[in-house]
Amino acid sequence: MELAYIPSPSRGVLYLGPIPLRGYAFCIIIGVFVAVWLGNKRWLARGGRAGTVADIAVWAVPFGLVGGRLYHVITDYELYFTEGRDWVDAFKVWEGGLGIWGAISLGAVGAWIGCRRRGIALPAYADAIAPGIALAQAIGRWGNWFNQELYGKPTDLPWALHVTSSADGRVPGYYHPTFLYESLWCIGVALLVIWADRRFKLGHGRAFALYVAAYCAGRGWIEYMRIDDAHHILGVRLNVWTAIIVGLLAVTYIVVSAKKRPGREEVVEPLASGGEAEADGEGKSEDEPEAEAKDEAKDEAAADAETSETEAETKAEAETKAEDETKAEDETKAEDETEAEDDTDDTDKVKDEAESAGKKS
């Protein structure tokens, strides 16, 4: 008798008239919105502009979806290109099947294109979006629950997943809910990156590398529990090897980057702080001509104001000089008149004295 278990949904799609609403796709969409929302908040806190994260996500998300699907189809090609299979199913993304390794790899290419178009360094953008990606994965994993896929080994634990579908070789029963394990792990990864970024001021891509390393650590043991078909190398599942290699590369990057470029970027989006339109050689922004035009207009206005001020000062100096010259002339004229009056008085005095002497004689 089962005391408790996680039930599986009776179906993974609902129909709104003729429009199918698939749980898997719905989880992916919600995850993208959460990643962009959190990434935008972190980008603004670093001094970036609102809307930049979403603009770059327009490039990163489609590339990521294509990359995730390609990885899944290549590593599980027998599901689509073997006898009795229909290769057209490789395009049915809504039925499940996205490899996170391919999604992150090709998504980074799309993000690089978007960053280059805006004159932003990719590592700074990756640091801002890293916790959001982890939360997007946590939400997206519930799409596997809707599809009743990617569960683990049989178990009688009270949180066992009750699989009811028998399609595609499934055996109804109670299994480890590896989708739930990974979802919770990704939430923990997001919180770890946020805490470490605040505590150690991670920069130059190290916050993103920490997300990759922490995710790989969890994916390794979760992947080991899964029982779905997968390719093996030396008796170990392919995704386990991928997690080990990618995780080690991420740790190596953190160590090397911390020595070569300690600290974090002071400016993540130059145009937001009035700087040049280039960031670490990553290219120029499409908004640069408009920004340069505004700067030129400001410079011209400042020059005109300075010219007007200079002309006003020159005019005032000329008027002052004219007033001084007029005042000097008036003073000179007054002195001349005073001297003339003194001479006249002296002449009259001499004349009077002469007349007086004549009368005496």
Image (spheres, rainbow, N blue to C red):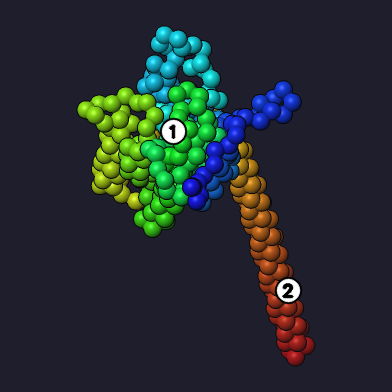
Identify the residue under disc 2: 341
Tally of marks: 2
| Residue under the image location 54 percent in, 42 percent down | 7
For residue 217, side relative to residue 180 (left or right): left
What amino acid type is highlighted by mark number 1? Leu
Q: Which mark is residue 206?
A: none
Query: Residue 345, located in which quarter of the rendered image?
Result: bottom right
Mark 2 lies on a secondary structure that is helix
Residue 17, quarter of the rendered image: top right
Tell me residue 51's x, y (percent). Answer: 59, 40
Q: Position of residue 107 (x, y in %)?
A: 45, 29
Earlier-in-chain disc, 1 versus 2: 1
Camera-side mark, 1 or 2: 1
Q: Kindly identify the amino acid type of the residue bearing the numbered disc 2.
A: Glu
Horizontal side, residue 260 vs residue 361: left or right: left
Q: Residue at x 71, y 73 (%)?
A: 338
Tell me the residue that label 1 is attached to.
150
Q: Residue furthest left?
A: 234
Quadrant of the snapshot with the C terminus: bottom right
Query: Height in image: 170 above or below 299?
Result: above
| Other-residue count near label 2 (Cα within 10 Å), few / some / many at <14 / 14–19 / ≥20 | few
* Furthest-bottom residue in this view: 360
Residue 183's place in the image compared with 321, above or below, is: above
Residue 333 location (% of width, % of height):
70, 65
Which residue does the image show at 55% across and 34% down from the upper left?
Answer: 146
Q: Secondary structure at mark 1?
A: loop
Q: Name the residue nearer the viewer: 327 or 167.
A: 167
Q: Is residue 37 visible?
A: yes
